[in-house]
């Protein structure tokens, strides 16, 4: 049994949401650092 | 004040604000580029939250709650796939390239992009016709959803609800165009998020928190908290894919990427869209918990309206209703602009649109095209309203796979169009036809194996695209250089 009384496989859905937020922030930081994005 | 009075006051203020925004944005809409893509001047906050609002319609909120009620907590995976695949990854993978390609190819619509990318007028016409037919059908389902919830919560007759919601949207879309759509959607996204959080927290309070709710649901039936639980893998995975991967081929969402003012918008936009999209888990979670508070329901679609009445006071209920209306209206409005573009720019009803010469903002004939665009959006809206007024049974059946058909047609020609130089005109056109045909046939056959028609549609269209492209003459190098910016 995982957190919130949910089986781990079901709780995994909430982890995926948290991971998505982390991925978007990491990508935004990388995109800035790589000189990505233009003002064209 | 009576409950209906509270609902009418909140809703009246909200609808008046939408019309006001439409009139205000109408002053900034001077040509076809303004009407269809806001003159490519939209920033990160409005792009991201209008994307979220257009993505999640009232059908998702009410229908998501119904799925949660019926199948339990395993439906959280649908919300999770919405966030990861339908928000985060699509922004990262497609956002920049689609902006660059549509800018280089001077495209304002997805069919227009496909036509220019592959030099295939027939692919442009086919995708525009698919969008015209199935987007209107999709809008019928959105309107029916809004009408039903207004009827359920406010007691307004269904037909009057359809008329009120439809006419308000027609006014602000036809006057204010894309800018009105994205700015109203931006506001609507916040109303949706607030309404969903309100209902979720009120429900959590009633059931004693998420842990207690999970334990109580498991006591009712362990399948209500397990994955895949009572739904099974086939249904859960195929539905999660259609409502998340499908986004990659949906023109009313992809337009957000080529209306951005520049690609710097993507940095903050991707984070904001992910955060806003995270609300996608709420309808499923709330719907699952509603099983503990409501009597057994024959129609799970009633779960969210009944829960609203059970756990929120009239003001809270009115705000949630405004949120559901916001979800439906933002989607309906976004689709109207896309259908209008398909009619005027891609099918060229009223004459071929002209591109602007270099350095000229509005091409000759632009005001004529603006007028045609406004008329086409009105016509598309009126057709949807007319059908939704008394929807034939067949239309209600088709709405279940309108999204699947459009995504099957557009997904690979768009995604591979910005990543694979070897994709050919014949490959793109045949993949669209095959994708639509297979998705339709699968659904008409009654979803064999319990799998949604999107899955076979999108698999077949990929195989056909790659296979036909490899066996036909490579694309014109000049066309590729222009698309990839190598000139």
Image (cartoon, rainbow, N blue to C red):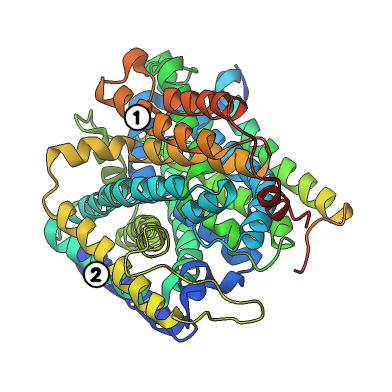
Indicate the secondary structure of the residue bearing disc 2: helix
- Relative placement, left or right, of B221 versus B411 is left
10 Å crowding of disc 1: few (<14), some (14-19), many (20+): some
Instruction: Give residue B432's position: percent from left, percent from top.
Output: 44, 36
Q: Nearer the viewer, residue B115 or B252?
A: B115
- Identify the residue at horizontal 33%, vertical 27% (top origin): B70
- Identify the residue at horizontal 38%, vertical 57% (top origin): B335
Residue B229 against residue B67 in the figure, above or below: above
Q: Is residue B311 something that shows in the picture?
A: no
Instruction: Give residue B157's position: percent from left, percent from top.
Output: 11, 58
Q: Is residue B236 something that shows in the picture?
A: yes
Cα distance, mark 2 to mark 1? 34 Å
10 Å crowding of disc 2: few (<14), some (14-19), many (20+): some
Quarter of the image with the C terminus of chain A in it: bottom right
Quarter of the image with the N terminus of chain A in it: top right
> Which residue is tagged 2?
B167
User: Which numbered tag is attached to residue B437?
Assistant: 1
User: Which numbered tag is attached to residue B207?
Assistant: none
């Amino acid at each position: 049994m995982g957190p919130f009384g949910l089986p781990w496989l079901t709780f995994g859905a909430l982890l995926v949401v948290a991971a998505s937020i982390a991925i978007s922030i990491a990508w935004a930081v990388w995109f800035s650092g790589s000189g990505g994005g233009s003002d064209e | 004040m009576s409950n209906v009075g509270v609902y009418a006051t909140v809703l009246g203020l909200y609808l008046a604000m939408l019309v006001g925004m439409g009139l205000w944005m109408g002053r900034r809409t001077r040509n076809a580029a303004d009407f269809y893509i806001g003159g490519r001047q939209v920033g990160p906050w409005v792009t991201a939250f209008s994307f979220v609002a257009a993505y999640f319609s009232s059908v998702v909120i009410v229908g998501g709650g119904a799925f949660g009620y019926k199948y339990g907590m395993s439906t959280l995976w649908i919300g999770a796939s919405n966030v990861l695949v339908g928000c985060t990854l699509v922004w990262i993978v497609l956002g920049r390239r689609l902006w660059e390609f549509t800018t280089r190819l001077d495209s304002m619509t997805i069919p227009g992009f496909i036509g220019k990318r592959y030099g295939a007028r027939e692919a442009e016409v086919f995708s525009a016709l698919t969008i015209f037919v199935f987007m209107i059908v999709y809008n019928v389902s959105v309107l029916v959803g809004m009408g039903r919830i207004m009827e359920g919560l406010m007691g307004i007759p269904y037909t009057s609800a359809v008329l009120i919601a439809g006419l308000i949207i027609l006014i602000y879309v036809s006057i204010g165009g894309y800018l009105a759509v994205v700015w109203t959607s931006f506001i609507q996204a916040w109303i949706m998020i607030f309404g969903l959080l309100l209902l979720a927290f009120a429900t959590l309070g009633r059931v004693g928190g998420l842990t207690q709710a999970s334990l109580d649901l498991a006591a009712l039936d362990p399948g209500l908290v397990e994955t895949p639980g009572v739904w099974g893998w086939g249904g859960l995975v195929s539905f999660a894919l259609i409502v998340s991967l499908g986004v990659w081929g949906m023109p009313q969402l992809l337009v957000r990427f080529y209306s951005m003012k520049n690609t710097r918008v993507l940095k903050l936009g991707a984070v904001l869209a992910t955060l806003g999209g995270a609300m996608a888990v709420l309808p499923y979670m709330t719907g699952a918990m509603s099983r503990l508070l409501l009597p057994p329901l024959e129609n799970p679609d009633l779960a969210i309206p009944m829960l609203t009445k059970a756990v929120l006071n009239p003001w809270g209920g009115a705000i949630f209703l405004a949120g559901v209306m916001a979800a439906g209206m933002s989607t309906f409005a976004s689709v109207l602009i896309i259908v209008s573009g398909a009619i005027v720019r891609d099918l060229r009803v009223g004459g071929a649109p002209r591109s602007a010469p270099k350095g000229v903002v509005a091409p000759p004939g632009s005001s004529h095209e603006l007028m045609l665009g406004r008329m086409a959006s009105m016509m598309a809206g009126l057709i949807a309203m007319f059908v939704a007024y008394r929807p034939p049974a067949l239309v209600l059946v088709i709405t279940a796979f309108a999204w699947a058909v459009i995504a099957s047609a557009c997904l690979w020609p768009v995604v591979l169009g910005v990543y694979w130089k070897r994709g050919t005109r014949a490959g793109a056109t045949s993949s669209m036809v095959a994708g639509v045909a297979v998705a339709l046939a699968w659904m008409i056959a009654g979803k064999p194996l319990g799998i949604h028609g999107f899955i076979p549609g999108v698999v077949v269209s990929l195989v056909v695209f790659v296979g036909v492209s490899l066996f036909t003459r490579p694309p014109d190098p000049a066309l590729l250089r222009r698309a990839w910016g190598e000139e």
